Every structure is written in structure tokens, then in C-alpha cells.
């Protein structure tokens, strides 16, 4: 980051405006890539009309692969953008629309801005930090993939649903590897999902026999963007390759030429023959749900509806008298498992918020400690 900042300072101390190097985009030019009136309006609001826009296909540290009506090209972030952008979530990620300056003679396009996102998928960054990490932007539908064998877990499914709904993305559940389980077991898994109160569509499929794959294909609409989410090994890449036909994800990389070092950017966003766009993502080892309460409302809409009838407005639905949620659990109209997941996820959401506040407080205390320590004449000698 430091060298990014230094480079930014060196290359671009003065703010500069950039020339329009191309015809401004029309919706017709770019709608096959997902551009529409909504994005055009965002661009206008941000004062970015008239600039060329492209969609991010892959990100590899400082290098991006972007795509517009003329095809794919590589791009870098403008020094000024690097300099002005503080939070990692504000950097372009796959699926983003960016303002880019690019002449056919240039090896790299220069990205000057990111068009506001309509939807996003993000997770808690790996490690002990409380920062978010963007997974993808401007996704219409998240395909949450679980394998029928070993991987299936309703709690995890609900965590994904919270994240997905929190990012304003619609969910569809894909159950893979149906060839490895009996029809009775498959029905049991479907029942488990239904009993948990999950209302998202569920498609069962096998990449081996091909059963269900056409159902997935039929669901994918041209100009819409889909993102595959799920643990490693559940069959996401295999499914994409099946949907693509001959092409393969592994061979989709774009090689850089004419440079000292040979680089390959693995393409993450691919277009199918029917015009739908698919984003494949690595398995998620660490899956935090910081800031997920908003999303809780959607996954647990039934519980929130019941909560309106609780005796106390601030009812925690744990052991309060007159709690409509507990009553529904008692009379069997609200599934026990669903209620337990609600409590668990809510506590985690509260826990993450708490640890965030605690961290802020600690930082403050540390600042105060430093201030008072500096005033302390013994400070220099002690340290
Ligand atoms: N039996 C069976 N095996 C499958 C199916 N789909 C994928 N596999 C196998 O499962 C393994 C993992 O599949 P991948 O497609 O690489 O899984 P992935 O979800 O993309 O994994 P990551 O790339 O690590 O996120 C491979 O050996 C596949 O051949 C399926 O429907 N049935
Ligand atoms: Zn209650």
C-alpha cells in the first residue's frame, strides 16, 4: 500500500481531468454486459457521463482485465484514484463498472472511477480485522452451491443467504452431486431446506450424469450476472465448464505480452453463449457476517412478522413473557431449527458489532495512552 501511495504521488501529484477518448456509452452498446438505465443514472449523478465505461472481468492486484463493446483489454488504476481511495471495498472488484481511458495504441487502460454498485457480495476479511473484502459487484443472482454429499449444511446455507440478501442479491440454491445420493436422501435434504423456512428456489443437479444442468441453463438470462458461491470442491468450476461447453475456465486467462514479466490474469467473469454472465469464486474458508443484521430481516422474515405481535417492543425472543416468536415455536408453527439459527446468527451479528465497537474503544484508549505517555517525563527513558 505504501509503495502504491508513493507511486501515486510520484506519477500524479496534481489532480487532472481526463479526455474523453471514445464515444460516450449508450445503453444499447453495453446492455449485453449488464449496463442499463440504472447504471447510466448513477454515472450521471456522479458527473461521469460522457466517459467510456467498461466492466471488470478479473482483478489481479494492480492489474485489471476489463471488457467493453470492443472486447477485453487490461487496465490499471489511475494514480489519483489510488491516492484518493482509502477503503479496500472502494477499489474495483470483479463485476464493477469503471470509467476508463483507453486508446487502442495504449497497452493499458487507465481506470479513473468506479460507478456506484447496485448490489454486492462481500465477506469479512481474513484474519482478526473487522474489514470487509469485496467478492463481486453488480450481481443479479447468487447461486449458492452445496454438495449433497458431505458438504450439505443448512446453517451454512442460511449464513450465505444472509450475506447474499444483505448485498441486495437474489439467491438460488444449487445442490450438486445428486449422483452420489439416493432420491430419498435428496428429498430429505430438500425437506431440511424447506423446514428451515428457506424459500429460495432449489435446483438439484449432477455434473456427472448431467441431470438438472439444463434446468440451471434455462434459468440463466442474457445480460444478467450470476455468481457462484460455495465451499471448495462442491463442483462450481465443473458446472461452469459444463455450461460453457468446450471452453474451460483454466484456459480463459489472458496473457500479457511485451513486458519484462509474463503475467496471466485468470478471468473470473465469463459469458455463456446465451449471453448470461457467470462469476466463479474460490471457496470461502473464513466466513464472517459482519453487518449482516439487515440481511437477517429477509432470511427470517417470518420471525420478524411474528415479532410484531410480541408484548414488548424490545423483545429479544429468548424468554420474555408474551413473546409471539416463542409461542410459535411452542405450538410448532415455527420450526425449532429455524428459530435456533435465527438466535445464533443474531448473536454473531451482535458479537461482530460488539467486537468492532470494542476495537474502536481500544484504539481510542491507546491514543489517550500515547498522549498521556508523551506528557510523562519518564516516557522516553522507559521506552
Ligand atoms: N460425483 C460427482 N462429482 C462431481 C460433481 N461435480 C463436480 N464433481 C467433482 O468434484 C471435484 C471438485 O469439483 P470442482 O468443480 O473443482 O469444485 P469447485 O467448487 O469449483 O472447487 P473450488 O474451485 O476449489 O472452489 C472434482 O473432482 C469434480 O470432478 C458431481 O455432480 N458429481
Ligand atoms: Zn418476542
Image (cartoon, helix red, strand yellow):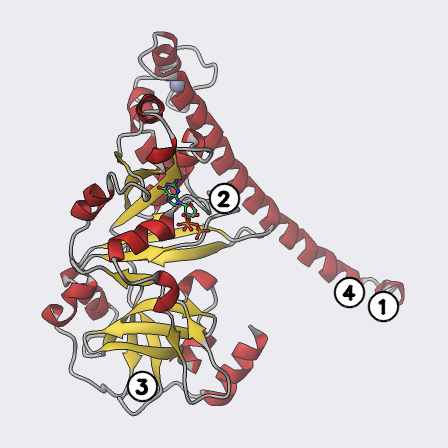
**At 20% from the left edge and 61% from the top edge, which residue is drawn?**
34
The numbered mark, 4 or 3, whose residue comes first in the sequence reads: 3
Residue picked out by circle 3: 17
Check whether the beta carbons of the residues at disc 2 and disc 4 lie within 8 A of each other: no
Residue picked out by circle 1: 380
Residue picked out by circle 2: 288
**At 44% from the left edge and 27% from the top edge, which residue is drawn?**
341
| Front in this rendered view, residue 379 or 57 | 57
Mark 4–mark 3 distance (CA, rounded to whole Å) = 44 Å
Measuring from the top left, give residue 135's x and y in whole percent.
40, 56
Q: In the rendered view, does 301 fall on the left or right side of 148?
A: left
Mark 2–mark 4 distance (CA, rounded to whole Å) = 38 Å
Mark 2–mark 1 distance (CA, rounded to whole Å) = 41 Å
Measuring from the top left, give residue 96's x and y in whole percent.
31, 64
Residue picked out by circle 4: 374
| Front in this rendered view, residue 282 or 235 | 235
| Front in this rendered view, residue 15 or 79 | 79
In the depicted structure, whether residue 32 falls above or below residue 208: below
Q: Secondary structure at mark 3?
A: loop
Amino acid at each position: 500500500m505504501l509503495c502504491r501511495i508513493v507511486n501515486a504521488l510520484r506519477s500524479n501529484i496534481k489532480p487532472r481531468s481526463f479526455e474523453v477518448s471514445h464515444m460516450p456509452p449508450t445503453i444499447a452498446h453495453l446492455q449485453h454486459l449488464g449496463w442499463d438505465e440504472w447504471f447510466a443514472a448513477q454515472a450521471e449523478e456522479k458527473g461521469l457521463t460522457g466517459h467510456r465505461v467498461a466492466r471488470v472481468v478479473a482483478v489481479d492486484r494492480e492489474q485489471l482485465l476489463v471488457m467493453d463493446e470492443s472486447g477485453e483489454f487490461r487496465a490499471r488504476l489511475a494514480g489519483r484514484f489510488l491516492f484518493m481511495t482509502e477503503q479496500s471495498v472502494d477499489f474495483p472488484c470483479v463485476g464493477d463498472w469503471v470509467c476508463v481511458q483507453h486508446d487502442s495504441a495504449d497497452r493499458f487502460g487507465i481506470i479513473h472511477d468506479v460507478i456506484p454498485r447496485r448490489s454486492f457480495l462481500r465477506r469479512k476479511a481474513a484474519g482478526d480485522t473487522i474489514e470487509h473484502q469485496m467478492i463481486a459487484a453488480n450481481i443479479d443472482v447468487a447461486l449458492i452451491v452445496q454438495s449433497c454429499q458431505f458438504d450439505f449444511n443448512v446453517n451454512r446455507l442460511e449464513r450465505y443467504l444472509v450475506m447474499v440478501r444483505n448485498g441486495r442479491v437474489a439467491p438460488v440454491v444449487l445442490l450438486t452431486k445428486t449422483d452420489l445420493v439416493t432420491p430419498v436422501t435428496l428429498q430429505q435434504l430438500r425437506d431440511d431446506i424447506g423446514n428451515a423456512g428457506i424459500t429460495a428456489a432449489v435446483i438439484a443437479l449432477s455434473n456427472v450424469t448431467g441431470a438438472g444442468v439444463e434446468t440451471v441453463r434455462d434459468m440463466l438470462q442474457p445480460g444478467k450476472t450470476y455468481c457462484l458461491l460455495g465451499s471448495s470442491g462442491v463442483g462450481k468450476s465443473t458446472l461452469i465448464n459444463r455450461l460453457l461447453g468446450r471452453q474451460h475456465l483454466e484456459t480463459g486467462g489472458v496473457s500479457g505480452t511485451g513486458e519484462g514479466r509474463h503475467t496471466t490474469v485468470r478471468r473470473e467473469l465469463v459469458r455463456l453463449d446465451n449471453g448470461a454472465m457467470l462469476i466463479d469464486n474460490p471457496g470461502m474458508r473464513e466466513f464472517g457476517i459482519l453487518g449482516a443484521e439487515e440481511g437477517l430481516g429477509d432470511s427470517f422474515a417470518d420471525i420478524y412478522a411474528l415479532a410484531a405481535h410480541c408484548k414488548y417492543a424490545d423483545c429479544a425472543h429468548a424468554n420474555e413473557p408474551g413473546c409471539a416468536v416463542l409461542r410459535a415455536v411452542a405450538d410448532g408453527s415455527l420450526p425449532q431449527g429455524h428459530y435456533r439459527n435465527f438466535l445464533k446468527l443474531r448473536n454473531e451479528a451482535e458479537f461482530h458489532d460488539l467486537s468492532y465497537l470494542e476495537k474502536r474503544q481500544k484504539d481510542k484508549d491507546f491514543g489517550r495512552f500515547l498522549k498521556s505517555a508523551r506528557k510523562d517525563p519518564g516516557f522516553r527513558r522507559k521506552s
